[in-house]
Amino acid sequence: MMSSHYSFFRKAYEYMVTRIENSLQNLDMTVMERCLNQLYQGRLDKRVTVCGAGRSLQSVLLLGNELENVYGVRVNQVSNANLRPLKAGDFFIVNSHSGSRKVLKHAKFACSRGLNVIFITGNENLLDEFENVILIKDHLDCNKEFAPLGTEFEQASAVLCSCMGFAYNQTDKLKTFNEGYYNAITGLTKNLKLLEEQEEFLLKFVDLIEEYLDIENNNVVYFKGVGINEIISRVIAIRYGHLHKNNLKDLRVVYEGHWRSRKTDDLAIFLSGSGETDQTIKYARQAGDIGMKLFTITSFKESSLASMNTFYKNSYGNLIIEGRPEMISYFNKSLRNVDIKFFPQFELNTYVTLDSLLALIAKRNDITEEDMKKTHRDRELE
């Protein structure tokens, strides 16, 4: 019999998938086709720069990852200190729900320099300001219990950017984009069915996070992955870093870096689609050897990463998440040499799964959206 905790998790997961589906069904496909065609036409001599903040930046980096690793297109971030002066004719891709403040300033500057600006946003006021605005808009009411602090736009734009990368070099780009979208939704649904058989490990993950949520626990939590899984690790670290309630609850999450500062009884959560990425396995061994607690997430229970459960007594479980078609590390093999056309289904499934678990953790610990807002960094530093 399904527990009430799993039932809530499932409802949160289904809510998020519905929001993604609804958002992408309402896209202006004429604009999408124009953007895809322009991007591909500039593949030989045009640079691509991406811009965004927080989780929105990580979503557009999923597109950047595919352009670089599948097609060899170099992609820079605005924050890159090596970024050369913007050049007319290059591409500037922005992802921002509000489409305001710093990212809007950057987009206007790029436009003034003659760059091709592609603006992915939920702000319809930008339709009159830029030629290529991909508007993500659905008509459903937000559910603060299932998605505290909002995550709907970021998840929808993550799927959208993944589908853009999937369709990049195809002859019929719209058809391939829609195939990617269909596969993404189908994959998310299939993954939930697999998770129904893993309620024990889902709740183990929740219990483990709650142990570190206790205000008296001064140890920290690391989310670790490499390559495209590093992008998802950063997204999840941002989300889980908001788990806070006054002087009662506070999850101390390491957003990125600081791995050398790890210590006994810290928690490390490792993400790897194949479970065979050498660098991730090395990190897991480093963690286990000093007595950190481990939890692993991969697509293959027989993988080297999943087998850490048998090596370390402080390993608390492995969650199997659908999405990677073969047990091969794509990080250590050029995606241009992979026979199966790459689509980041494991990463999208992991994103929605861990976000749904966050909703459950927040509910179990009476952490509201208002509590989570208090952890935002000062606007003056944005």
Image: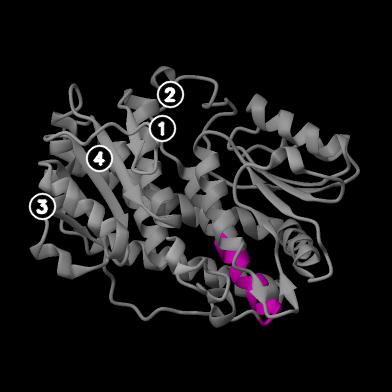
What's under tag 1, amino acid-wise?
Answer: Phe
What's under tag 3, amino acid-wise?
Answer: Thr
Name the residue carrying label 2: 335
Q: Residue at x 70, y 60 (%)?
A: 252
Q: Where is residue 140 in the image (x, y as percent from the top left)?
A: 33, 78
Is the residue 145 above or below the residue 29 in the image? below
Give the mark nearest the N terminus, 2 or 3: 3
Magenta range is 355-366
Based on the picture, tell me whether residue 98 belongs to the magenta stretch.
no
Q: Position of residue 146 (x, y in %)?
A: 52, 75
Q: Where is residue 113 in the image (x, y as percent from the top left)?
A: 12, 42
Q: Where is residue 203 in the image (x, y as percent from the top left)?
A: 74, 63
- Picture quadrant where residue 92 is located: top left
Q: Tell me how far mark 1 sits from mark 4, CA to CA.
A: 13 Å
Name the residue carrying label 1: 342
**Quadrant holding the C terminus:** bottom left
Nearer the observer, 219 or 30: 219
Name the residue carrying label 3: 30
Q: At numbered mark 2, what does the secondary structure look like: helix, strand or loop?
A: helix
Q: Tell me how far mark 3 sits from mark 1, CA to CA.
A: 25 Å
Q: Tell me how far mark 4 sits from mark 2, CA to CA.
A: 18 Å
Q: Residue at x 57, y 26 (%)?
A: 329
What's under tag 2, amino acid-wise?
Answer: Leu
Give the mark nearest the N terminus, 1 or 2: 2
Report crowding for label 2: few under 14, some 14 to 19, many 20 or more residues within 10 A (C-alpha): some
Q: Tell me how far mark 3 sits from mark 4, CA to CA.
A: 14 Å
Based on the picture, tell me whether residue 362 belongs to the magenta stretch.
yes
- Picture quadrant where residue 125 is located: bottom left
Report crowding for label 4: few under 14, some 14 to 19, many 20 or more residues within 10 A (C-alpha): some
Q: Is residue 276 visible?
A: no
Q: Is residue 157 left or right of residue 284?
A: left
What's under tag 4, amino acid-wise?
Answer: Thr
